[in-house]
Image (cartoon, rainbow, N blue to C red):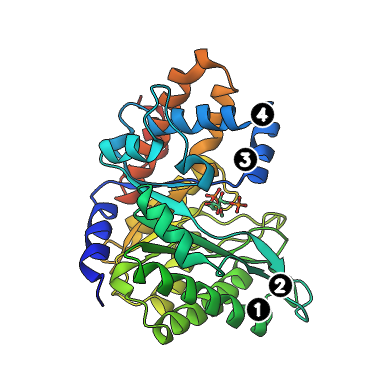
Amino acid sequence: MDNAKELRETIAAIVAPGKGILAADESTPTITKRFQAVGIESSAESRRAYRTLLSTAPGAEKYLAGVILFEETLGQADNSGTPLPRVLAERGIVPGIKVDKGTTPIAATDGDLITQGLDGLAERLASYKSQGARFTKWREVYGITERNPTPLGISANAEVLARYAAICQAQGLVPIVEPEVLIDGDHTLERCHEVSEAVLHAVFDALHRHRVLLEGMILKPNMVLPGKANPRKAAPEEVAQATLEVLRRTVPAAVPTINFLSGGQGPEEATANLNAMNAMDRRAPWVLSFSFARALQDPVMHAWKGDARSVAPAQELFVHRLRMNSLARDGQWSAASERER
Ligand code: 5MM
C-alpha cells in the first residue's frame, strides 16, 4: 500500500508505552446532553473552553498518545489563539477526528442502525488532514434485543466500517474502527459475548475483503459485559476472560492495538476491567489500551461545571484518571492506586 509508511508512523506514536487515547469527539447534541447533566450551558464558547481544559492539562502528555476531536473542535483555538490540533501536536499528542455522521435505522431489521457519512468522505478527509488530523474514528452501534442485531444489520454495518477504513488509509489517515455493542438492556454477559463475536467476525471479514492494512488500523471495541439492567454484575476477571476470548477468536494478530470504549461503565469500573485483561494476558498479540470518553471525562466535567476557577482541579482529576488507566494498560492498577495522588 502506498501510504503504509505514513500509517505505520502514526501507529508507532499511538502504541507508545503507558499511553492511550482520549475520546473528546462528542457531537454537539451529545456534549450538550453531557453538559446539561451537570448544569453547564452548551455553546460554542463553553465547548471550546472545555476542550481547551482537556487539551492543555499539565502532565497529560505522559499518558495521552492521541485525542479524538469533533469537527467543531478541529477549528477552535486555545485562550492564546493557537489551534487546538496544534496545541496537542506540540505536546506530542496525535490529533484525530470523528468522521461519521451518526446513525439511521436500517429498513426491515426491526431496530438495527447503520452509520452515515460515506458520501464525500474522501474530500472531507483531505480538509481534516490539512487541519492537522492524523487519524480518524467511525462508530457503528449494535443494540441487543432478542432479535437484534440481525444478520443483515451485522453484515451491512461491517461493510460500511470497512469502506470507511479503506477510504481513510488511501488518504494516509489511520482509521479507528469502532463497532460498539451497546450496554443497554438486561441481556446476559453470554449474550453480549455471542453478539460481540459475530460482529467482530463480520468486521474483520469485511476489512479483509476491502484490503484494509491491518497493521495500519486501530480497533475500538466494547468490553464483553452483562446489560446495564441485568441485576447480575460481572467481576473484572469475568469481563476480562470473556472479552479476551472473543478478541482471540476474531482479531488477527496483525492489528497493533485495541483501544476500548467505556460504553457507560463508571470510571473505576472501566479501569478495573482494562487492568484485569492486561493482568490476565501478558502475552496478548495486541496492545490493550483505552479510548474512553465518559470514563475519563465524567469526573472532570463534574469538577469544572463551566467555572474558570475550577480549571486546575478539574485538570488534576483528568490526569489522575489518565494515570490510573495507564497503570491498567500494563496490568499494574489496584484499588489502592486510586488513593495515591
Ligand atoms: C461509544 O462512544 C465513544 C466512546 O465513548 P465512551 O467511552 O463514553 O463509551 C465516543 O467516542 C463516541 O463515539 C463519541 O462521544 C461520539 O458520540 P456521538 O453520539 O456524538 O456520535
> Whole-percent x and y of residue 259?
40, 57
Displayed quadrant of residue 149: bottom right
Q: CA distance from mark 2 to mark 4?
A: 31 Å
Is 90 placed left or right of 272 in the picture?
Answer: left
Displayed quadrant of residue 251: bottom left
Amino acid at the residue labelled 1: Gly
Q: Is mark 4 within 8 Å of ligand 1?
A: no
Q: CA distance from mark 4 to mark 1?
A: 35 Å
Q: What residue sits right under mark 4 in the picture?
A: 38
Q: What residue sits right under mark 3 in the picture?
A: 31
Q: What residue sits right under mark 2 in the picture?
A: 112
Displayed quadrant of residue 53: top left
Amino acid at the residue labelled 3: Ile
Q: Does the residue at mark 1 contact the one at mark 2 (Cβ under 8 Å)?
A: yes
Secondary structure type for disc 3: helix
Amino acid at the residue labelled 2: Asp
Q: Does the residue at mark 4 contact the one at mark 3 (Cβ under 8 Å)?
A: no
Of mark 3 and mark 1, the one earlier in the sequence is 3
Local crowd size for mark 3, using a 10 Å CA cut-off: few (<14), some (14–19), many (≥20): some
Local crowd size for mark 4, using a 10 Å CA cut-off: few (<14), some (14–19), many (≥20): some
